[in-house]
Amino acid sequence: MEKSEEKESKQCEDEVSHLALDIGGTLIKMVYFSSSSSSCSTSAQKNGSEKDGIDASSENLNYSFLSGRLHFLKFETKNISECINFISSKHLQHYADVLCSSSLLMDGIISNSYLLRGSVNPGYRDDDALANDKNIIKATGGGAFKFADLFKEKLGIVLDKVDEMSSLVAGANFLLKAVHHEAFTYMDGQKDYVQIDHKDLYPYLLVNVGSGVSMIKVDGDSKFERVSGTSIGGGTFWGMGKLLTKCKSFDELLELSRQGNNKVIDMLVGDIYGGTDYAKIGLTSTTIASSFGKAVSENKELEDYRAEDIARSLLRMISNNIGQIAYLNALRFGLKRIFFGGFFIRGHEYTMDTISVAVNFWSKGEAKALFLRHEGFLGALGAFMSYQKNGITDSTNQLMEQHSSMPKSLFCTGNGFDSSTHADTKDNGYIECKVQIRN
Ligand SMILES: Nc1ncnc2c1ncn2[C@@H]1O[C@H](COP(=O)(O)OP(=O)(O)O)[C@@H](O)[C@H]1O
Ligand SMILES: CC(C)(COP(=O)(O)O)[C@@H](O)C(=O)NCCC(=O)O
């Protein structure tokens, strides 16, 4: 293949810009924008009057639109080489230094769509440019520090570190203000989307349940304080679950918990009070008095318990605890809304239900637990948004959401990439976008 053809073909495969990473204790989250394959063109078309990939009908004197997707992907941090291989196979690193000279600016909302501004340069860079060390991508999470040398060595990428808490807050604020149907409540099997008035968003408590848990009081754009945290988080559930049930994947553990009965292991108020409520202090007989407490008095070994029941008790114990600590922090600062993010939540019904019940129980119905559709990608989105900060301020392009399709299995194919081994398709997805380009 001629060099120019090769360039063109790569351009058509992957017209990518604005790649950001959140490298956490357990998972790597990736967000990037690509123009859709239908917007790829041949040179002849490009030289013609039609501006391929640009929706001419949406053109005005100053702008036209380029269709594309905001992609969301995750990898296990322990398999970081899969992430590196993916970046390499999609040539994502080649677009890195385009990004540092660009900007991305959340600007407002247009009729249930979100509007980002940023310069998107899908152009392919020449080999000389690729060879220098200016390939910089925004990265947050502890892994941005831990794996900086690895990215440099394997991909020639310099990770431009973005603070983890700032990224979480920026990501949450962006989603809450800009994405329609982002936040929802979940109680008794019912999911209700909550329309957020973005003028009345603050203050709120953001609880990010990743490997560990961070609780952040958010008072405005870039105005926040990490008020608490707990080490009993997603890593605890997955780590203890793995040891106690011998299951091989997080999904398997969640599935086990779905089928389990926690009463087999948890000691209930009724177990202590002879089957009755302790009404004087507001405890029903079915309230858990002591998580895993039954195991103390029963003459049983670990093998005598069903893995399903163990998983259920564990999930309930950790979710309850997070819900309770979150509520106590909301109480400290008089916050009524608590948003839960992080991949521990995983849209799992029982997890969300348990957290909601805990918040409702402890707040006597005063505070509400809210969940986010893009729960696990707050940090990565925040890092993605941070391109606006050190970019050109008179940014010219805009990204506009059309519709989100999460979860969805897609784009993890081709280029030798095997989706089944690289990413959990349940959590990967994309948002259809249009990028507005100045003519
Ligand atoms: N496929 C998965 N593999 C491992 N953990 C998962 C997976 N899906 C969800 N989890 C849960 O998500 C947690 C990690 O959440 P995340 O927000 O990505 O945190 P971190 O940034 O610390 O990696 C894990 O500890 C686990 O509880
Ligand atoms: C250190 C962390 C911010 C790292 O984030 P993570 O990778 O867990 O998403 C988080 O694990 C945490 O807040 N842990 C709780 C520490 C504490 O306050 O006790």
Image (cartoon, grey):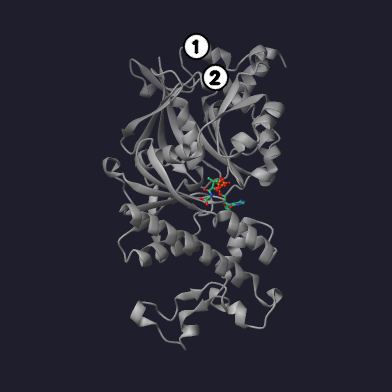
**Quarter location, residue 59:** top left
Mark 1: give few (<14), some (14-19) or many (20+) Cα within 10 Å: few
Are the residues tagged 2 and 1 within 8 Å (C-beta)? no
Vertical arrangement, residue 103 with respect to residue 354, above or below: above
Name the spot of residue 178 as percent of width and height, x first. 36, 38
What residue sits 42% from the left and 37% below the top? 170
Residue in front for this viewpoint, 77 or 225: 225
Vertical arrangement, residue 113 with respect to residue 246, above or below: above
Name the spot of residue 13 as percent of width and height, x first. 61, 27
Q: Earlier in the sequence, mark 2 or mark 1?
A: 1
Task: Say whether residue 16 is visible.
Answer: yes
- For badge 1, the amino acid type reads Gly
Residue in front for this viewpoint, 348 or 57: 348
In the displayed structure image, the side of residue 390 where residue 282 appears, left or right? left
- For badge 2, the amino acid type reads Val
Vertical arrangement, residue 219 with respect to residue 239, above or below: above
Image quadrant occupied by the C terminus: top left
Mark 2: give few (<14), some (14-19) or many (20+) Cα within 10 Å: many
Name the spot of residue 270 as percent of width and height, x first. 46, 83
- Identify the residue position indicated by label 1 in the image: 48
- Identify the residue position indicated by label 2 in the image: 98
